[in-house]
Each structure stands twice: as C-alpha cells, then as structure tokens.
Image (tube, rainbow, N blue to C red):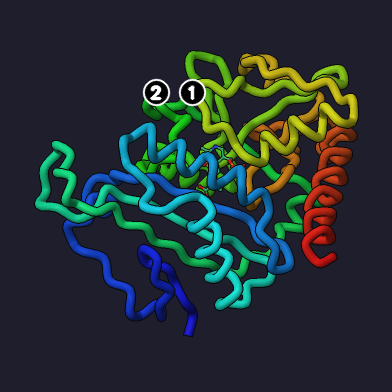
Amino acid sequence: MVKVMVDDKIIDRLEAAIDIEDRGYQFGDGVYEVIRIYDGVLFTGDEHLERFYSSAEKIQITVPFQKEELLGLILRLIQENRVKDGSLYMQLTRGASPRNHIFPGKDTKPVLTAYTKEVARPVESLENGVAALIADDIRWLRCDIKSLNLLPNLLAKQAATEQGCYEAILHRDGLVTEGSASNAYIVTDGKIKTHPATNLILNGITRQVVARLCEKNNIPFKQEAFTLDELQNADEIFVTSTTSEVMPVVKLAGKEVGDGKPGELTRKLQTLFVQEFESVKKAHTL
Ligand code: PDD
C-alpha cells in the first residue's frame, strides 16, 4: 500500500482523512511544493524547503516542524514508497475551522500533507520541443507565493491544452511574466532573458539552477522583463519547472520559433541540467 504523510505520521493512503472544513479545501488557504526525485534522490530539496517556509511565512502560517525534521520526514516517505524517478507533493494549510474568512485562532493547527508518485522525465518533449500559446496573466499580485490558489493558472493551462499546446506563456500589458506552471525565457543574439524575481512571478527552483549554471558557464543571463514583441521575435524560447526541466518551445501561437527546432543554447542548458542532477545523484551514492 502506498504511503502518505499527514502531519508527522506516515500512513497508508486510504487511512488519510482531511476535515471537510480544512481551509485549504474551502479557501485554497495554504501553500505547496513539488520536488523532483531522480533515482530515489531528492533534487534541490533544500531550496524547495526554503521556499516552502518562505511561502508559509508570507501568508502567516507557521510550519509546525523545523526544516531538518521536515526533511527527515519526507526522506522517509520517499524511502517507504521506494520512489525511483518521481516527485513529492507537499502542502500546508491553515487547518480546519468553521468556515470564516477571518483567520482562526491559535488553537487551530496547520495541516501538513505529502505524497509521492512516479513521474517519468518527459524525454520526447525535451528532445523535440513543445508548442505554447500566449495568454493574459489574470493572476493576483503575489505570484511569488506558491499558494494553493491556482485557478487562473488552471484556466490558462486548460486553454493551452485544448489548443494542442503544452504551456501558456503569460503577459501583463505586453510584458511576459512566466508560464502557467513554469518560468519563461527567450534567447536573442546568444543572450538569455527572463522576468526578474518580483511579486509577479514564482521564483522557480529550476530557474535558480539555470541562473547558476549560466553564471558558471559564462552564458549571458539577464533578469529583465521582455515584451511580447521580443518573445515573438526571439531566436529561442524555453520554459523551466521541476517536472519540465529545461523545455524547448519550438512553436509559439502557431508559428515556428527560429527554425522550429530546439535552439543551440537551450540544448546546452539541457545538457548542463542533466549533468547537474546526475552529479547530485552520484554525490548521494558515494
Ligand atoms: N509549478 N511558475 C509557476 C507559476 C509554477 O507553477 C511553477 C512550478 C514554476 C517553476 O517552479 P519550479 O522550477 O520551482 O518548479 C514557475 C509546479 C511544478 C506545479 O505547480 O506543479
């Protein structure tokens, strides 16, 4: 039986029960993380935990465990489920309390849940690239918080899927912010640009890895907002996320990007990214 985590208990999935008045369920009042597991090894776990605590703090929820303790718990869950290539989903809500927009009192305990699943790397899409469309960014102004409230993201992703696209690239008044579930980048004349880590985007952990890899390898990387016009005339486009890694976008709004194949710099970053998680795996097994 597959195991899940509820608070600090690791139990059978069918034993898990959430109160019908859990505020995550009723209001989306909580935060979450998705962490990649490669060959049983957690990738960028510290960075994800850091963001989890920071998201929780921004909405005034206290994570009921110290970081080390929480890390220990999720490592145990991964081990008990014998996850090979997969992901860990973890969320924290403000807890269960009679429905009221006002925060409940201190006696209401936040509810932490987590589960794992097997997820294959999207190798075919990584190799050939994907299509994207352009959509209005209709989200709120605190996209830096990894909150459970994802309706605008879902609407954008659904519209993309219905039009045969993998992702929707969002913009506010002509300035590109990010994807519906990813960060977005352009390459123009050998230089990478992505929106700065402000309140208008989620500062992706994969984005942080890409920034680091660029710095290490002398690849020009600028955190600067770019226009729809720049997007539509870019030599290369890619999006990044925990599960999408460095994903080439080869078609935008029905038109080919460059020659319609993943670009050179995107390929280079893909190679560097694979080297990065391979070295983490190796370091873990030494
Ligand atoms: N989504 N921006 C948004 C809006 C996202 O939802 C995500 C990730 C990212 C990329 O962040 P990271 O590199 O840390 O995964 C950017 C996750 C994977 C999800 O909701 O499933």
At 16% from the left edge and 51% from the top edge, which residue is drawn?
A: 107
Query: Which of the marked residues, 1 or 2, is nearer the chain's N terminus?
Result: 2
Residue 146 position within the rendered picture, expressed as x and y whole percent measured from the top left = 45, 39
Say whether residue 274 is visible: yes
Category of crowding for the residue at label 2, using alpha-carbon neighbours closer than 10 angstroms: few (below 14), some (14–19), many (at least 20): few
Residue 161 position within the rendered picture, expressed as x and y whole percent measured from the top left = 53, 48
At 81% from the left edge and 35% from the top edge, which residue is drawn?
A: 213
Residue 216 position within the rendered picture, expressed as x and y whole percent measured from the top left = 86, 31
Q: Which mark is residue 200?
A: 1
86 with respect to 163 (left or right): right
Amino acid at pointer 2? Leu
Label 1–label 2 contact, CB within 8 A: yes
Of the 4 image quadrants, the one containing the C terminus is bottom right
- Residue 227 versus residue 67: which sits nearer the camera? 67
Q: Mark 2 falls on what kind of element?
A: loop
At 56% from the left edge and 16% from the top edge, which residue is drawn?
A: 175
At 61% from the left edge and 34% from the top edge, which residue is drawn?
A: 183
Amino acid at pointer 1? Leu
Residue, disc 2? 141
- Residue 122 versus residue 223: which sits nearer the camera? 223
- Residue 267 versus residue 105: which sits nearer the camera? 105
Residue 227 position within the rendered picture, expressed as x and y whole percent measured from the top left = 62, 14
